[in-house]
Amino acid sequence: MRLDLDSEEAAFGGASIDRNGVPITDDVVAQAKGVDAVLMGAVGGPQWAKVPRENRPEAGLLRLRKDMQVFANLRPALCFDALADASPLKRDLVAGLDIVIVRELTGGVYFGAPRGIETLDNGERRGVDTQIYTTSEIHRVARVAFELARRRRGLVHSAEKSNVMESGLLWREEVTALHAAEYTDVSLEHILADNCAMQLVKAPKQFDVILTDNLFGDLLSDEAAMLTGSIGLLPSAALGAPGKPGLYEPVHGSAPDIAGRGLANPLAAILSLEMALRLSLNMPNEADRLADAVKSALNAGARTADLGGKLSTRRMGDAVIAAL
Ligand code: IPM
Ligand code: MG
């Protein structure tokens, strides 16, 4: 298989801090906005923990998401048959699991103002974050979830805390309105986010697409990741308006505790490329072949340490290439 693709590399996160003092430069942001797809490595590590907050790797990630306007984050949790026993949950709960979390990615409490830490007159300190959503922000991400469900099993669960949060109530009302106006062929269920967390471990296969906000999506997607056996398997896609470049990244972090030892599972990164081929590069056949190669490698017993195996990062990559 030969991919007819051009690629460019750019420094991001710690690599950019070391070189430029900032986690991402204006030039790299502009470069990212000018390509078809961005495939990102995980960022962060203890050597940058003392960098001022606005220059940490995480700040660069949030800026890239915001500037690329990739408001819909697709985080699939797919349980490969060969790995159903690697999940901490019982095999029959997760075998065949295939769900996608659609996480709002450029709004909510991650970006809401006011925010900050202040000292009050009485000497106490006060930390403030603001959860905030508007109609259009809710509609555009809900639309992605409904469209996705149409191509899958036709079911969307919308998760929020409308029982305590105003923004959650707005979320529920706006998702209901959009559904009634344009997506009555898709089934819509509302679920409180805490119950969603519980149901995800109790009976995960009841879900198809879970639509939720930025913060709840962060939490629920880590939980969903563990259902599949290892967070080292999970890719993600962040999409903006049609025709705009997508941002593809593994769900996992940079795992500084195992850095440089050849222990990391490369499959989440490989599957992120698969999503890019499918969703931004219009190469569905190539995407299918890559996905099949990952499955064959797993079926043949290829396992990195996170899955209880002995293969190094490089050998796992070789196993996928051999299957390809
Ligand atoms: C994720 C990560 C990020 C987030 C961090 C690194 C800023 O946890 O992509 O899930 O909270 O969005
Ligand atoms: Mg997270």
Image: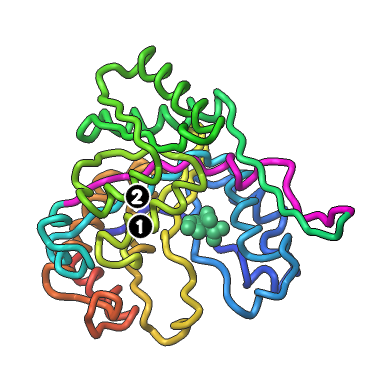
Q: Which residues are magenta?
A: 97-121
* Circle count: 2
Q: Position of residue 108 (x, y in %)?
A: 58, 40
| Residue 7 in view | no
Observer-nearest of 74 and 53: 53
CB under 8 Å between discs 1 and 2: yes
Relative height, residue 66 to residue 176 (above, below) = below
Q: Quadrant of residue 249?
A: bottom left
Residue sticking out furthest to the front? 122
Label 2: how many Cα within 10 Å (few below 14, some 14–19, many 20+): some
Q: Quadrant of residue 125?
A: bottom right
Relative height, residue 252 to residue 37 (above, below) = below
Q: Is residue 227 left or right of residue 12?
A: left
- Residue shown at 71% from the left, 58% from the top: 25
Q: Identify the image quadrant of the N terminus.
A: bottom left
Q: Name the amino acid, label 2.
A: Ala
What residue is disc 2 on?
A: 197
Q: Is residue 63 left or right of residue 170?
A: right
Residue 21, disc? none
What residue is disc 1 on?
A: 223
Secondary structure of the residue carrying numbered label 2: helix
Relative height, residue 106 to residue 311 (above, below) = above
Q: Position of residue 133 (x, y in %)?
A: 58, 32
Q: Position of residue 33 (x, y in %)?
A: 60, 45
Residue 230 covered by magenta stretch = no
Residue sticking out furthest to the right? 121
